[in-house]
């Protein structure tokens, strides 16, 4: 259909048109998620799909709809520098809305959501194209949109300690993976916010979280070499990890609030993060260790808890 058709749908209140089947409309909008035209992606396809998801148009079809959507995460996976990233990234955005709908309405079995979680985490770790903004094309933002999907999964009642721990590990794996891209379009804040959703669930204990923070901190340290130069430092991955640790520290220190309109978020983020004081100290220790020439050192150091 022409862009003017879709603009008329938006202008009429974003209701599902009666002249075509929901299936046909959905297939066309899903195809538009990969369009190089930002107006089609951000101005038409995603807003309409998100609106219909949250108005319940897909409730009876949510499992099949999600199973169809999630396949977009593997579209061109492994490629970088082309436009295939648009389909993968915007698939993550739509899947975020689907998971958020299930978090509110409890429509799906655990196995379905966990299966999507497996596919989402596998995609995010393997994604090679980390561009935030593409000139003349607009937002790609795979890492930021992937972070939002992790945050929705972290809120899922189907996810408990084991699954939430995996989400933290995926964040670390993504940050520490070698890359040529420096993340500077707010991805650090979005990843830290996903981590905060995990921490506010209070299912993952400090003896797991503090070693995770220490692992990230180790990734910001310049490798020791014997008489050899290790090249430019920090590497993009080390820079990205450092930015994340600082974002996490700031969010722990200031506190975060829930997403507007997301059921349960007001209660989830009503109080400071559990174990906030210990986690702040753990984050500070890693930030200090990255630049020991800059920051003062406390007289006594805290041991990092071992995992049991």
Image (spheres, rainbow, N blue to C red):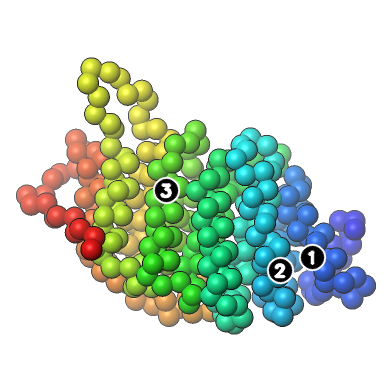
Q: Earlier in the sequence, mark 3 or mark 2?
A: 2
Asked whether, in this view, residue 195 is left or right of residue 77, the answer is left
Q: Is residue 48 above or below residue 236?
A: below
- The answer to whether the residue labelled 1 contacts the one labelled 2, judged by CB atoms less than 8 Å apart, is yes
Asked whether, in this view, residue 233 is left or right of residue 286, the answer is right
* Residue carrying label 1: 26
Asked whether, in this view, residue 267 is left or right of residue 60, the answer is left
Q: Secondary structure at mark 3?
A: helix
> Quadrant of the image for the C terminus?
bottom left
* Residue carrying label 3: 173
Asked whether, in this view, residue 127 is left or right of residue 282, the answer is right
Q: Earlier in the sequence, mark 3 or mark 1?
A: 1
Q: Position of residue 49 (x, y in %)?
A: 72, 66
Mark 3 to mark 2 CA distance (whole Å): 29 Å
Q: 63 and 1: which one is in front?
A: 63
The image's mark for residue 142 is none
Q: Secondary structure at mark 2?
A: helix
């Amino acid at each position: 259909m022409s862009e003017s058709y879709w603009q008329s749908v938006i202008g009429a209140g974003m209701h599902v048109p009666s002249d075509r089947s929901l299936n046909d409309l959905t297939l066309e909008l899903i195809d538009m998620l990969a369009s190089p035209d930002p107006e089609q992606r951000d101005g038409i396809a995603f807003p309409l799909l998100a609106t219909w998801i949250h108005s319940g148009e897909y409730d009876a079809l949510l499992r099949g709809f999600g199973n169809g959507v999630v396949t977009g995460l593997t579209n061109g996976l492994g490629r970088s520098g082309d436009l295939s990233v648009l389909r993968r990234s915007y698939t993550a955005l739509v899947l975020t809305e689907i998971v958020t709908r299930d978090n509110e309405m409890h429509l799906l079995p655990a196995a379905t959501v966990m299966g999507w979680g497996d596919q989402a985490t596998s995609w995010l770790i393997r994604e090679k194209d980390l561009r935030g903004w593409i000139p003349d094309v607009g937002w790609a933002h795979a890492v930021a949109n992937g972070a939002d999907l992790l945050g929705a999964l972290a809120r899922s009642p189907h996810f408990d300690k084991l699954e939430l721990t995996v989400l933290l590990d995926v964040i670390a794996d993504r940050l520490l993976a070698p890359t040529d891209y420096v993340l500077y379009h707010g991805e650090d804040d979005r990843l830290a916010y996903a981590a905060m959703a995990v921490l506010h669930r209070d299912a993952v204990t400090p003896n797991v979280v503090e070693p995770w923070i220490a692992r990230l901190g180790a990734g910001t340290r310049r490798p020791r070499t014997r008489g050899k130069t290790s090249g430019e430092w920090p590497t993009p991955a080390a820079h990205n990890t450092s930015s994340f640790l600082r974002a996490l520290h700031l969010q722990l220190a200031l506190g975060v609030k829930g997403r507007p309109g997301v059921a349960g978020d007001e209660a989830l983020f009503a109080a400071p993060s559990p174990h906030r004081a210990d986690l702040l100290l753990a984050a500070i220790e890693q930030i200090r260790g990255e630049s020991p020439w800059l920051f003062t050192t406390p007289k006594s150091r805290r041991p990092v808890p071992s995992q049991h």
